[in-house]
Image: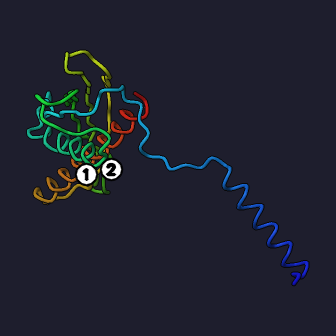
């Protein structure tokens, strides 16, 4: 049985496409890492707070722990069993008003945090360092103090999570 010319052309084109696609070199990505050999585990102690904002170290430490645990390329362990230690310092924390209503009341704030991060091996040698990493977020102002503080806390958690994600990417891809 022979196929009509239209079907033969479609079959040939389909087979050629499949042949070309199979040889294009596509591969699954996402687990590639540039971390030095032998670095299989990391400890992430509580960040140091060099600001006047109480408790700011908590969302950053939690964000980094969650991000590295979720990634699974290196195990997150306690300091005494770790190949390396990722230490963080919150160097500055600023909130400025960025928009106002017609009456001059603040509508939105911008929060900016600057971190210093250093990864050291077990012997204390610096393997990687980010001296001045900054991140910012805007949050809505509210005349209600509790709502305002809740909005601020959410923005701080977002900065912690997003900073951890960006640093994790640098850690694994730009080591």
Residue 76 in which image quadrant: top left
Secondary structure beneath dot 2 equals strand
Estimate the spatial distance between the alpha carbons at disc 2 and disc 1, rounded to whole Å. Answer: 6 Å
Residue located beneath label 2 in the image: 99
Position of residue 3 measured from the top left corner of the image (x, y, whole percent): 87, 81
The residue sitting at the front extreme is 1
Q: Indicate which disc residue 106 carries.
A: 1
Position of residue 175 measured from the top left corner of the image (x, y, whole percent): 40, 27
Identified at 19% across, 16% down, the residue is 123
122 to the left or right of 13: left
Residue 90 in which image quadrant: top left
Question: Mark 2 touching mark 1, by CB under 8 A?
Answer: yes
Crowding near pointer 1: few (<14 within 10 Å), some, many (20+)? Answer: some
Position of residue 139 measured from the top left corner of the image (x, y, whole percent): 27, 52
Position of residue 92 measured from the top left corner of the image (x, y, whole percent): 22, 30
Question: Which scheme is used to colour this image of the protein?
Answer: rainbow
Identified at 43% across, 34% down, the residue is 173
37 to the left or right of 152: right
Q: Give the number of callouts.
A: 2
């Amino acid at each position: 049985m022979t196929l009509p010319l239209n079907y033969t052309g479609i079959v040939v084109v389909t087979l050629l496409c499949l042949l070309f696609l199979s040889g294009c070199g596509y591969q699954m990505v996402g687990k590639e890492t540039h971390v030095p050999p032998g670095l299989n585990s990391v400890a992430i102690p509580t960040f140091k707070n060099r600001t006047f904002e109480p408790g700011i170290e908590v969302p950053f430490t939690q964000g980094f722990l969650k991000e590295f645990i979720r990634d699974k390329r290196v195990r997150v362990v306690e300091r005494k069993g770790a190949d390396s230690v990722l230490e963080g310092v919150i160097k500055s924390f600023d909130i400025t008003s960025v928009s106002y209503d017609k009456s001059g009341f603040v509508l939105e704030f911008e929060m900016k945090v600057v971190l210093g991060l250093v990864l050291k091996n077990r012997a204390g040698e610096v393997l990687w360092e980010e001296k001045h990493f900054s991140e910012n977020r805007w949050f809505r102002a509210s005349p209600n103090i509790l709502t305002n503080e809740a909005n601020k806390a959410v923005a701080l958690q977002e900065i912690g999570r997003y900073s951890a994600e960006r640093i994790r990417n640098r850690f694994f891809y730009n080591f």
